[in-house]
Image: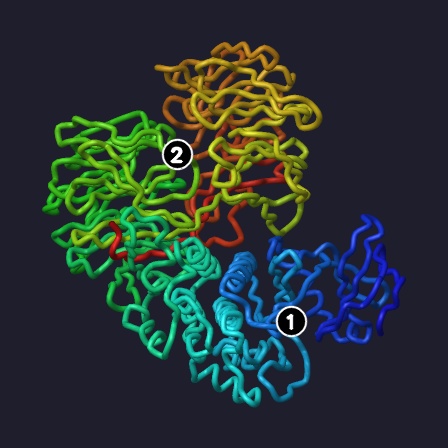
Amino acid sequence: MSLNSGTKLGPYEIIAPLGAGGMGEVYRARDTRLDRIVAIKVLPPVMAVDSDRLQRFQHEARILSALNHPNLLAIYDVGSEGEVHFLVSEFLTGHTLRTLLDESPLGVRRAVEYSLQIAKGLAAAHEKGIVHRDLKPENIFITDAGVAKLLDFGLAKVAPVSDGSGITMTVQTVPGLVLGTVGYMAPEQVRGQAADTRSDIFAFGLILYEMLSGKRAFHGVTAADTMSAILKEDPPELGETGRQVPLALESIVSHCTEKNPARRFQSAQDLSFNLEQFTHSSGSASVLPATGRTIRHRLRPAVISFGVLLLAGAMFFAGRLTKVGARPIFHQLTFQRGRVLGARFSPDGQTILYSAEWNGESPDVYSTRSDRPGARSLGMLGGEVLAVSSAGDVAILSKITVTLNFADTGTLAIAPLSGGAPRDVAESVQFADFSPDGTQLAIIRDLVSRGRLEYPVGKPLYEAGAWLSNCRISPRGDQIAFAEHPGFNDTFGSLVVTDMAGHHKTLEKDWFELLDLAWSPKGDEIWFTGSSQGGQRSLYAVKVQDGRTRPVLEAPGNVVLKDIFRDGKVLLVRENLRRELSGFVGKEAKLRDFSWFDWTNATDLSPDGKTFVFYEAGIGGGKDFSLFLRKTDGSPPVFLGSGYQGALSPDGKWVLANSAHPPAQMFLYPTGAGETRQITHDKIDHYSFAWLPDGKHVIFAGSEPGHSGRLYRMDVEDGSTSPISAEGLGFFGLGQLSPDGKFALTVCADFKPCIFRLDSGDSRPIPGLRVDDVPVQWNEDRQSVYTFRFGALPVQGQRVDILTGSQRPWKKIAPADLAGVHGLSGVSMTRDGRVCLFSYLRTLSDLYLVQGVQ
């Protein structure tokens, strides 16, 4: 049944038909409420009685509604009118990629431009756990503005089988049956096996091949011929098609279309990264074209069998190198989804030891080799690799007691690589490194409010009221380099070098991010991972003699240094690092994703749970961070301005915020009409704060130069400030105020949670709570508080009586997807517990061995 012009489907008025597919008819329509043109996909009534077709149609609606990306078709609405079921999407003007390809082959520039957009759209879908399963030029739309959009996600098209390689097969989601379009199916789909994200990557490779060559990669006389070719043959070399194609692009196509899924790109994100790097590489358009049949053979040496020869000479990864023409070679060593924690070369330089958390499981220690594929567990479940000695011992961190964003605290243990049980050496350790002869260890201990470097173990060499990280001993054994961070669990910091007598000097100061480091083989430079202005992490080197710094490797994505071998080989991690925000609202069973940019952290929630304040501190937020106001109904956030923390006033008309960098000053942002104003102009570093019920005063934690942190009371109108606690109380910040505004949650001098009385200045501990218990909110009964002990996931929340210390389990919180997640923190919740938002760090990373970096 076709719909005539003027037919109404709810508020939508049909204008004209656009086309029809296996799952419905598509119309151009007008949204009468917003007076905008939309596209409507209708499942005809005759199909609606078919439960399978109706289920597939509803499946498409659910999938599209979960996706929000410029390279994916946007869904506006879904509904039904009588027996007619329909979904409403954005209206696109342009052509399908199939139409463009049928007209003429695309040039290299346009092919790369479209393919990069397609890869980014795939990455966004795959991030949500969605596999397309039927990617082909017909399902890719190129708008008049040149934007690529992926269509028909999650659908299995139903049509009769006929001869030809471009035919859509009759499919069902049943094991053993073929799912996809002949000519664009991956080998595993041809065999009737389950399709995953790597199947989409195979199809992507075939589409890129077709865009570059103007010919289909697999095209038989019959569908059976095409399927057989997919299983047994390679596509003709791009050079044989008569097109001039850069070798680097042929490398990408070749890697996408590997028969074995394990040898393809393991994520669309990696694929888009490599395409992006190709576009950034100087002279990429003039790279020698691929000709003859030798290219594919050159792409299949032993290293390809276990990793990836990234863009034929590291064109993928090598962004800007200090030596013109330098071309490092990258070998990918890990392929699973999760986080690489630590990695070190063994004494032979061929074996690599690393620790990783894969697929949300506990960390484990693995061994792999650079000359053959695969990795084996060393049976050290829960361990993290810290260092490997020249004598063949490995230092691991075990029995983790505290898990933070960028470091864990636990027990240092030593185990021989030849086998044997680990031997405990020291507690409260975060980092360690062996001396060149392997007989001594330098360690960094976490002393809660201080960091201490010891060498050897037990002998203090450097101590500060700061977080110390990443100690590395020089090749000559006469100096130790480490990073010093003024904020605990914050990577803003400086690079320090000390000799064995404790005489130290700062080589690099006040980097926005400064972390993993290693000495160069000659010992004249220290290489480190850093970000000077809040951008992506890159690799730098600083001369020990004069402090001169140079960039070593800059590339899209975060590059993190792990180790340097004496012959110059480097272990690097390429990672996607994000702070995400999730939460539950009311009685909803499903968690909502409130992440916005790349570093989302909620800092306050209105009492009714309808509005919250959050900041973005990553690349998207900029070096001064960005502050937003948002509703928990999922509507888009409102940008307030630059800022770090944020607290809603009792009447909801203002957000009190502080600046991102010390000494942080206080600002008032209006939530509606009004002007922003700065209310402090002093030398106090304002950490965290909370409004008093009168809406005229706030309590904040801060510190003056030369003094420890304490609590203050401030008049919002004129900014006048007076201390209300002794120094030391409030060092770690201020928690929530009680409903009557008489008490505050904070941390006492013994680092345990306590309750501070605002009028008298008295404080008392909450019975039964430990140093690692974090009280996040008062219960509405005013006699108990909600606490969390951050560590293993899921995190168990407790309701703790503030007088007796009795505890009642409340709720377990954790992200729905645990892969790469660590550092659960930043909980904001209502007093009745109906709304709870929590942030967490997700790091998805791959380990690479790199040769030729200088």
To which residue does mark 2 refer? 512
User: Where, quadrant-wise, is the N terminus in this rendering?
Assistant: bottom right
Give the percent coordinates (x, y) of residue 657: 55, 25
Quick one: SS at disc 2? loop
Query: Front-most of 130 and 532?
Result: 532
Is residue 169 positioned above or below 582 on the image?
below
To which residue does mark 1 refer? 99
- Dot label at residue 580: none
Q: Which amino acid does label 1 sit on?
A: Thr
Q: In this view, does 372 lie to the left or right of 459?
A: right
C-alpha distance separating marks 1 and 2: 48 Å
Q: In which quarter of the image is residue 233?
A: bottom left
Query: Front-most of 603 and 312?
Result: 312
Query: Front-most of 261 and 295?
Result: 295
Can the viewer see residue 602? Answer: yes
Q: In this view, does 211 lie to the left or right of 480?
A: right
Give me the residue at 54% from left, 31% from top.
785
Give the percent coordinates (x, y) of residue 175: 55, 78
Q: Quadrant of residue 603?
A: top right
Give the percent coordinates (x, y) of residue 438: 12, 47
Can the viewer see residue 410? Answer: no
Quick one: SS at disc 1? helix
Q: Which amino acid does label 2 sit on?
A: Phe
